[in-house]
Amino acid sequence: MKVEQAMEQPALRRLVQGLIEALGPRLRSVVLYGSAARGDFHEGTSDLNVLLVLEDLDPATLETLSPSVARWCAKGHHAPRLFSPALIAESADVFPIEFLDIRAGRLVLHGDDPFARLEVRGASLRLQCERELREKMMRLREGYVECHARARDLSWLLTDSYTSFLALFRGCLRLLGGEPPAGSREVVAAFCERAGLDQAPFEEVARLKRGDSAGADLKSIFSRYYEQLTKAVRTVDRFHHAQGGAAR
């Protein structure tokens, strides 16, 4: 999707115009990111993710942008992420996965490009990758304890976690020395190849997500999926940039 195509979306165009009118020079940038900016957008199923860069994040500015954001959210969209230029610079060590993902696929709909000169340290990226992988594995284990006997809930646990892990795989690919492809399936394939994982369990969960696996043995799928995710955590845990980018 190009900027011109993005601005053909009525709700998005109204959001940008409303913010410009309300904030004037206090609005530094409006950035579209995610699947729409990467060219993986599907009408009716994909989200329109927006990030706003404001001169200041003081309460008066937040109140001023509130009506435009409320109209946007009333259409079923997620609230925009709010940053200032200083906050982006200060947060690069905290949100390296998110910032690198935005930098790799973004459309600047208004103002300057706030990610053009973004710098992220490899150590920060490795730490976030491992921390979030471990956190999501913890939630996956806890969810399985609660719902393993209920097929519908177990199916939801698998497909919901797949979306979360997919976002992390983009960051992990960059950590391991690769640039993530645009498509979700290609991201999983690339990460599995780079990390030495069996892709098959992820494909099974992806089919569940598409509704193509009626009657599947969910516990068996979970077991294989869980095993490969555990290997992924170990791969990231052992990775050290100081050793030339090799996992030990």
Image (spheres, rainbow, N blue to C red):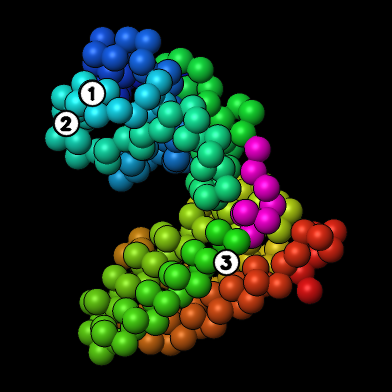
Dot 1 or dot 2, earlier in sequence? 1
Dot 2 or dot 3, earlier in sequence? 2
Residue 171 x/y as whole percent: 58, 53
SS label for mark 2: helix
Residue 58 x/y as whole percent: 30, 28
Q: Which residue is mark 3?
A: 130
Q: Residue at x 37, y 17 (%)?
A: 27
Using residue 37 as the reference point, say whether residue 54 is left or right of it: left
Q: Which residue is mark 2?
A: 70
Residue type, mark 3 in image: Glu
Q: Which residue is mark 1?
A: 60
Using residue 20 as the reference point, say whether residue 103 is left or right of it: right
* Residue projecting furthest to the right: 244
SS label for mark 3: helix
* Mark 2 → mark 3, Cα distance in angstroms: 35 Å
* Mark 1 → mark 2, Cα distance in angstroms: 16 Å
Dominant SS of magenta comes to: helix
**Which span is picked out in magenta?**
119-126
Query: In which quadrant of the rendered image does the C terminus lie?
Result: bottom right
Label 1 close to label 2 by CB (< 8 Å)? no
